[in-house]
Image (cartoon, grey):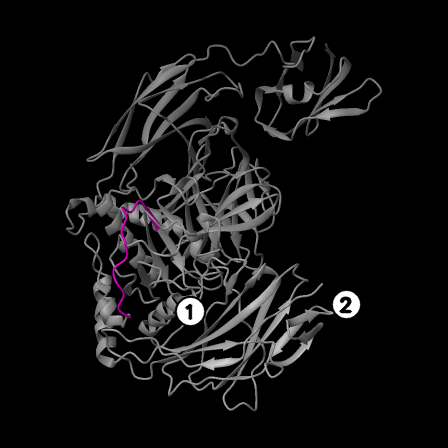
Amino acid sequence: MLLPVICYLFFVLNTYAQEKRHVFKGEDSETLEIKLTDQNALSKSKAFTQNSDGLALLKKTQELPEFTLKPIKINLKNPKPFISAYTVWEGENLDYTQMSLSYRTSKKGKSWSDWKPAVFDGHLEQTSERIISKMEFLDKKVKYIQYKVSLKKALKNASILGSKLFHYSPGKTSKKIQKQIEEHTNKATKAVCTKPSVVSRSQWGAIFRNPAATSTVSHLIVHHEFGSNTSSDWAARVRSIQNFHINGNGWSDIGYNFLVDPNGVIYEGRAGGDNAIGAHFCGRNRNTMAVCMLGDYSSVTPATATQNSIKKLLAWKANKEGINPLGSSFHPAVNGSLTHIAGHRDAGCSACPGNGGYATLGGIRSGVDILVSNGCSGGGSPPVADTTPPTTVISGGTVQTGDFTVNFADNDNVAVTRRYYQVLEKYSSSFLANRRKGFFNENFDQNFGVYDIGAGSWSVANGRLNQSNTTLDNTMWSSYLIQDSRLPYLYEFAAKVNSTTGPRKFGIHIMSSDGTLSQRGNSYLIWFSGEDNKVRIYETVNNALYFRAIADVSLDNNWAKYRVTYSPAFGVIQIWKNNEYLLNWKDTSPISSGVAVSLRTNKTAIEFDDLKVYKYRAGNSARITAGNQDNNKDLRTSVGKIKSMVRDDAGNWSSPGNLDITMNFGKEFTSPHSKLIVYPNEVTDHATIRWKQPDYGTVHISAFDLQGRMIAKMPKDYMDKGLSELDITSMTKSLPSGFYLIKLVSGSYLETIRIIKK
């Protein structure tokens, strides 16, 4: 197979026109075009032969093809403050994923740096005819550069028709302009509802371009530059990006509407304003506004100042255009629904804005929503924060004999947004809850010993759950909790970190498929870190941990209340510390059910208290089921409580509403089904098993043939003491017609019953 590589070796110095703007000291550029058919173009090649048609692959070779250009002199005069370098390769049937480019540099052409990768930019829209490397930033003293191209495999019918090497010195931004930019930094921290302070094109030194066409903006797109994360002159970096977009990408102007540096300074981008149609979203740029974070956030988190400025900029634009920051609507880039604040990668053609940048989008959406909801609709005046918490009151008969209804009166100065309730049962002097019904309450006033304790030094003392081990990075305290409602849950706990050094990390797994596994099976981990004052969301999939989202949080050694809400139907997780709204993230493939919650620490001494789980209620009443020691009921004891929690749109939480309940069940618990039964028996497909559980424990249910061979089994389950019932249809449905033995084992308790399957 021949791989003709037709390259031209001639040098054309090209300085683009400096139209209607100041020329910066040290500003210069050059474009070098190369033809590799010339014998003088190559330093060496491997697995190629060179002829008049270009480079040809050797037909029989075990080596991967590779060629190296001869060193190229950079002909810039006194470049400042750095040199940006990038390459463009044109041809046919190219595949940038199967090609690698590397470079090395020299100040005098004698000693050379190590080879470094020059990435073919996955952030851009590469084609089979034209591929571009991302910008590399070189020291201003570099005078020589050399490139090497390697093929990961033979590219069928591919040819490289030409290569252009671009070198650009953006020039040093004057002290006067730097001072103006510093003033923008200070202004940018103050603006909330009006347009934040923006460095104009003329200030950062843009080349004059005619204003672009405009469209109505419905979606706000976040990018990252994919460049280095440090710079002595960010305005010079913006000039470099404009040069790259015009000369490398062939665009009419810089592609983004706005750019934000790590100091939070916002720079005006494409000429034509915030409705200008840019070049950034996979060729579907209408109805979008682009903001680019300067730097590479493939794995690191954008600076807080960057995130804050983006929130203010997008809040201004969302308010101006009537865009719901938490909503979504149709966009042709995805031929379907697209979140109104999206990442470049959501169009499916790029990894931009990197994993670190993308993980912040949930916090940016929620931050923009809070800004818009608290003043941006008020004509641009600074918002007056709503700090008035809502209230909730419960009414109903305090003495009941069976199932009953309670009523809730919820009020707020603006509006109540979310409503939750909880049913508690009194055991001895403590109030717990029926975990099979999705409620949980543990105040740690005594040690009940009904939880799964894994790694760590866990103990209950003075009304607190203590974890004192500071060497283990994954401690485990778990409880079974059936979370199978499609309605939202509220998880709440208090915590006080006692460690003053080390990671100071702690959190909770929710919706866990198995609280005894190392990463809790399938779950979401809400993870707080005093080490860097961050809160993160992780998802565990098949017991492997995956990072999903991140936000800032101020953590110290004081008691605080932490709240997490999760909607299984929509996959939305929201997090608060006290009344501070921290983070929002949406799982597009949400976990729909779980059987455990689990606390966790990393080398941290900590105290936990008041671990609670509430269930969502849609209206102002709730039906409470009650039955003496009946595990299928909400309330199983003679004394109970109903509690309520509500939240307003500003993130304020109410104090708990409370109603004490006394149940008059009459006779003490007796069951006509104290022995194991299955009904109906003869079994068709549907079947239910009922028994009297002697004590809390793990329950295993299996089906055996009459020869004692296990045929099927149910997943592990949990049950409190009392009358218990489970649907076993998923097991019996798989059984062929015949006779079987159903065995139930829970600790030392074992019962067996014979059934007939029709």
Residue extending farthest front: 52
Question: Element under label 2?
Answer: loop
Quadrant that contains the C terminus: top right
Quadrant that contains the N terminus: bottom right
Residue carrying label 2: 62
Q: Residue at x 34, y 59 (%)?
A: 256
Q: Is residue 133 above or below residue 720?
A: below
Residue 709 at what x, y percent from top left? 81, 24
Residue carrying label 1: 229
Tell me the distance, in whole angstroms, between the alpha carbons under discs 2 and 1: 40 Å
Residue 674 at what x, y percent from top left? 63, 14
Label annotation for residue 298: none
Type of amino acid under label 2? Gln
Q: Is residue 746 above or below residue 185?
A: above
Q: Is residue 536 among what the camera can see?
A: no
Q: Residues within 10 Å of mark 1 (few under 14, many from 20)?
A: some
The magenta region covers: 207-220
Q: Residue at x 22, y 33 (%)?
A: 412
Q: Is residue 475 among what the camera can see?
A: yes
Residue 454 at what x, y percent from top left? 61, 46
Choose between 478 and 411: the one closer to the eye: 411
Residue 489 at what x, y percent from top left? 43, 34
The answer to whether 214 appears left or right of 520 in the picture is left
Magenta stretch: dominant SS?
A: loop
Q: Nearer the viewer, mark 2 or mark 1?
A: 2
The answer to whether 212 appears left or right of 433 in the picture is left
Which of the two discs, 2 and 1, labels the residue nearer the N terminus?
A: 2
Choose between 385 and 260: the one closer to the eye: 260
Type of amino acid under label 1? Asn
Choose between 176 and 528: the one closer to the eye: 176
Q: Does the residue at mark 2 contact the one at mark 1 (Cβ under 8 Å)?
A: no
